[in-house]
Image (tube, grey):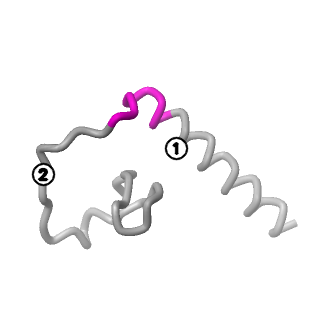
């Protein structure tokens, strides 16, 4: 699995590496520091997991 920002969906997504056929490296840089992106991803993932756990119980 590859966790990354999805430009199409404008959000974090998890991609299966066995389904990735091509990669395009862009020269443009994002304005957000990597550490902040990691914190946002972690908070979102924690929130998603909590929602799944509460709906399963």
Residue shown at 34% from the left, 54% from the top: 2
Q: Compare residues 43 and 11 and report the one nearer the observer.
A: 11
Which numbered disc covers residue 19? none
Query: Is residue 53 part of the magenta span, yes or no?
Result: no
Residue shown at 18% from the left, 43% from the top: 28
Assess whether mark 1 and mark 2 are in contact (beta carbons under 8 angstroms).
no
Which numbered disc covers residue 25? 2
Residue 5 screen position, x and y as percent: 38, 53
Residue shown at 55% from the left, 39% from the top: 40
Residue 29 screen position, x and y as percent: 23, 38
Q: Which residue is mark 1?
A: 41
Q: Is residue 56 left or right of residue 6?
A: right
Q: Residue 55 lies in what quarter of the image?
A: bottom right
Mark 2 → mark 1, Cα distance in angstroms:
21 Å
Q: Which residues are magenta?
A: 31-38
Q: Earlier in the sequence, mark 2 or mark 1?
A: 2
Q: Is residue 7 left or right of residue 45?
A: left
Helix, strand or loop for disc 2:
loop
Q: Compare residues 44 and 9 and report the one nearer the observer.
A: 9
Instruction: Give the prevailing secondary structure in the magenta stretch.
Output: helix
Q: Residue 10 lies in what quarter of the image?
A: bottom left
Residue 25 screen position, x and y as percent: 12, 51
Residue shown at 42% from the left, 60% from the top: 14
Residue 12 screen position, x and y as percent: 46, 55
Please identify the residue farthest to the right as the structure is shown: 57
Helix, strand or loop for disc 1:
helix
Dot 1 crowding, Cα within 10 Å, few <14, some 14–19, many 20+: some
32 w.r.t. 48: above or below: above
- Please identify the quadrant where the N terminus is shown: bottom left
Dot 2 crowding, Cα within 10 Å, few <14, some 14–19, many 20+: few
Q: Is residue 56 left or right of residue 22?
A: right
- Please identify the quadrant where the C terminus is shown: bottom right
């Amino acid at each position: 699995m590859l966790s990354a920002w999805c430009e199409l969906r404008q959000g974090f997504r998890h991609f299966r590496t066995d389904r990735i056929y091509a990669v395009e490296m862009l020269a443009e840089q994002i304005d957000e520091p990597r550490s902040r992106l990691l914190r946002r991803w972690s908070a979102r993932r924690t929130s998603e997991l909590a929602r799944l756990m509460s709906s399963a119980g």
